[in-house]
Amino acid sequence: MTRLIHVLNGPNLNLLGQRQPEVYGNETLADVERACADLARDLGVETRFLQSNHEGQLVDWIHEARLEAAGIVINPAAYTHTSVAILDALNAFDGPVIEVHISNVHRREPFRHKSYVSRRADAVIAGCGTEGYLLALRRIASLTAAG
Ligand code: DQA
């Protein structure tokens, strides 16, 4: 059976391409979804690409991932810096987790330097633009490969 990877996106990422393009670039989330699906095909994995502006919805998707997914790539967006609930949900997930940030959060405001999710993440990619999702997908594919 094809390995399923959940690619989860937090609040305001639906506005990618329109919102602060000087920080987040001009690509839309649909462009990122397409690029992930193309790479997933090459890697022999399947992606479920989801976005929500609601913390509880992201928690619910992480719970679903417990039952179905081999790994999680997550850009929790602003919830990175605030959400114990998302951290707790990820702590209940057994597979690899990679945290992605489009921007280099460490070069930005001090409140973005703290990540609850990083306490659980197996890897963190920040500042690679939307290519960070593809790097994360490659890593998750190798971490979840059989044998
Ligand atoms: C972000 C960085 C967060 O600090 C911010 O709240 C976001 C996006 C990023 O991808 O660079 O919404 O996660």
Image (tube, grey):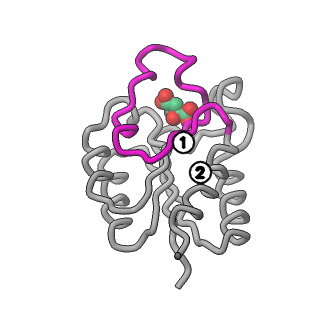
Which residue is painted at 71% across and 33% down in the image? 25
Which residue is painted at 37% across and 40% down in the image? 117
Marks 1 and 2 close (CB-CB < 8 Å) = yes
Which residue is painted at 52% across and 61% down in the image? 143
Which quarter of the figure has residue 44? bottom right
Where does label 1 land, which residue? 100
Residue that protrudes farthest toward the front in the picture: 147
Which quarter of the figure has residue 20? top right
In screen coordinates, is 22 left or right of 47? Answer: right
Q: Is residue 67 above or below residue 112?
A: below
Residue that protrudes farthest toward the bottom in the picture: 1
Cβ(mark 1) to ligand 1 < 8 Å? yes
Task: Residue 78: give x, y in percent of width and height.
Answer: 43, 32
Q: Amino acid at mark 1?
A: Val
Q: Is residue 119 magenta?
A: yes
Task: Residue 72: give x, y in percent of width and height.
Answer: 46, 57
Q: Amino acid at mark 2?
A: Ala
Q: Which of the two residues, 95 or 79, is positioned nearer the viewer here?
A: 95
Q: Is residue 121 magenta?
A: yes
In screen coordinates, is 58 left or right of 12? Answer: left
Q: Which of the two residues, 38 or 97, is positioned nearer the viewer here?
A: 97
Residue bounds of the magenta highlight: 100-129
Q: Earlier in the sequence, mark 1 or mark 2?
A: 1
Task: Residue 50: give x, y in percent of width and height.
Answer: 50, 57
Q: Secondary structure at mark 1?
A: strand
Crowdedness near tag 1: few (<14), some (14–19) or many (≥20) residues, C-alpha within 10 Å: many
Task: Residue 133: give x, y in percent of width and height.
Answer: 62, 49
Q: Secondary structure at mark 2?
A: helix
Q: Is residue 29 above or below residue 113?
A: below
Where does label 2 land, which residue? 136
Which residue is painted at 70% across and 28% down in the image? 21
Q: Is residue 41 above or below residue 133?
A: below
